Image (tube, helix red, strand yellow):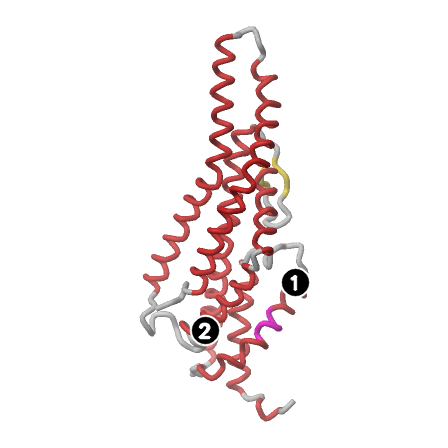
Amino acid sequence: MDLSLLTVNTVIAFLLVMFRISGMMVSAPLFNMRNIPVQAKIGFSFAFAMILFPLHAANLVVPKDLIQFALLAIQETVIGILLGFTANLVFIALQMAGEYVSTQMGLSVANMLDPVTQTQSPIVGQFFFYFAALVFLSLNIHHGLIVGIDRSFNWIPLGHFIGEGHLTGGLMAERFIKLTSDMFVMALVLGVPLMGILMATEIALSFVAKVMPQMNIFMVGMPLKVGLGLLAIVWCMPYMVGMLGDQYSHLVKVLLGLYRT
């Protein structure tokens, strides 16, 4: 190793690259799972930084003092966090769809501790999360996430603050508001087929309760809705795979151009 290449500028460039990648590791899907050791996340961040640092170190604008370096470090971390959060929106939408379906099935009270978020979430929501994770990995969308972090250095070079070019804070806020609103639409679209089947079951049970008032409709309806809900989930899985494929294709395009000016 040629130690003459180890200058102050190269160390600053490497640290800024690693800050941006570390921010992505905090919020990106699968990488942010709490059961992944912190040492592994640091190792991934260091390895990715070693790969990307030689490609973008030449564009570094050296900070003037320690305060400017600290501000740049915070900005780089936030850039990575926002990129990972964008990739995580599909998972959040699918978990929301799972909560809708759990409520219709009557399983909303049967919550379990989600090992990923360390919060209580419905069983159906957890199933949808791991289902989305399998599709995410099978389609190699995590490669798109890594390419997205690489492309971000082309739009926001090292040492540049957001707002110095055409990319402004207002434009970024507008983009993330649009992405967040799309998340709710995505959750509704993914959950509509299942919710429609369960709603039709609910209407049918209400007619039965009117026709046969002596029947204990609550004792019959609860297992019926759970059974029909599970069958509907199995029946809708091919549809959900196609929907997730379309959403992931759109997600890769968003990640590659998220910080485009």
Which-is-in-front pick, marks 1 and 2? Answer: 2
The x and y percentages for residue 127 are 61, 42
The x and y percentages for residue 234 are 59, 36
Residue located at (48% from left, 24% from top): 200
Q: Amino acid at mark 2?
A: Phe
- The residue labelled by disc 1 is 38
- The residue labelled by disc 2 is 153
Residue located at (47% from left, 62% from top): 83
Please state the extent of the stretch shown in magenta in the rendering: 45-49
Is residue 48 shown in magenta?
yes
Q: Amino acid at mark 1?
A: Val
Question: Is the residue 102 above or below the residue 158 in the image?
Answer: above
Secondary element at image label 1: helix
The x and y percentages for residue 164 are 34, 74
Q: Is residue 224 left or right of residue 97?
A: right
Distance from the alpha carbon under mark 1 to that under mark 2: 25 Å
Looking at the image, do the residues carrying marks 1 and 2 touch, with CB atoms under 8 Å apart?
no
Mark earlier in primary sequence (1, 2): 1
| The N terminus: image quadrant | bottom right
Secondary element at image label 2: helix
Question: Is the residue 159 above or below the residue 100 in the image?
Answer: below
Q: Is residue 205 left or right of residue 159?
A: right
Residue located at (48% from left, 38% from top): 191
Residue located at (50% from left, 42% from top): 96
Q: Nearer the viewer, residue 180 or 51?
A: 51
Is residue 238 shown in magenta?
no
Q: Nearer the viewer, residue 257 or 1?
A: 257
Q: Residues within 10 Å of mark 1 (few under 14, many from 20)?
A: few
